[in-house]
Image: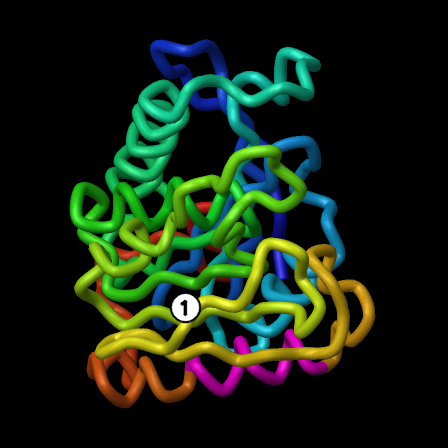
Amino acid sequence: MRSKVLDVATTQGPARVHLHGVSKPRAALVLGHGAGGGVAARDLLAARDAALAERLAVALVEQPYRVAGRRSPAPAKQLDAAWTTVVDELGRDHLRGLPLIVGGRSLGARVACRTAEATDAIGVLCLAFPLVPPRRTKPAPSRLPELDAVHVPTLVVQGESDPFGMPPPGKNRTVVPVRGDHSLRTDLDAVAVAVRSWLQDLAEERGYNGAPRRDSRVAKGGGL
């Protein structure tokens, strides 16, 4: 495995991409972080390792507000715009020619859902999707419509005691409960198993189980 870090210019400032390549990648997985965290979250790293084991190139994306050192996230439109800029840039260069799966943890999962069509994703991976904000004086609206709007295969890995609740399965959506809360730290092995199994199923369904397309660059000795 070869890795590199690169900055991508967006209208919101530079985003940072931690790119992990594999020999002869079959597809690519691009993941975003949670609202107040970064790309070193343990569940993100578990998902990264599961994808690498399945010969997927992986890009972990830091939003511009985090690169600038801020903890409070930007508004949704700005997050979505920065994300699509980064994914488009990766698709033109380092991940060129690879089927694309997008996702992230918590806030990053919401961004990936909202932009799944714009990024031409073949699947969406949601870690700890924040379904309903807890501990509000007034009932908060559910974010389920963001999940329901995704029309490609979607995996949600959710802690059984997540205070944000448990999303229901759907037509294109698989929900895997694991021990733990919103952090998903309690059973990282279960997170990895769920992600890897779903990626295997997606490979069969979407037909990228064979050799990668010849214009893909993220390979040992290639685009990295």
* Outermost right residue: 186
Can I make out residue 59 in this image?
Answer: no
Q: Is residue 153 visible?
A: yes
The residue lying at 60 percent from left, 62 percent from top is 48
Q: Which residues are magenta?
A: 190-199
Residue linked to disc 1: 25
Q: Is residue 203 above or below residue 81?
A: below
Give the image's coloring scheme: rainbow
Residue 158 falls left or right of residue 156: right
Q: Is residue 73 above or below residue 57?
A: above
The residue at 65%/75% (across/down) is 191
Q: Residue at x 41, y 26 (%)?
A: 79
8 is within the stretch colored magenta: no
- What is the x, y in percent for residue 207? 21, 83
Q: Is residue 58 left or right of residue 183?
A: left
The percent position of residue 138, horizontal first and vertical second, equals 53, 35
Q: Secondary structure at mark 1?
A: loop
- Work out which quarter of the rendered image holds the N terminus and state it: bottom right
Task: Describe residue 48's horizontal placement relative to residue 58 as left or right.
Answer: right
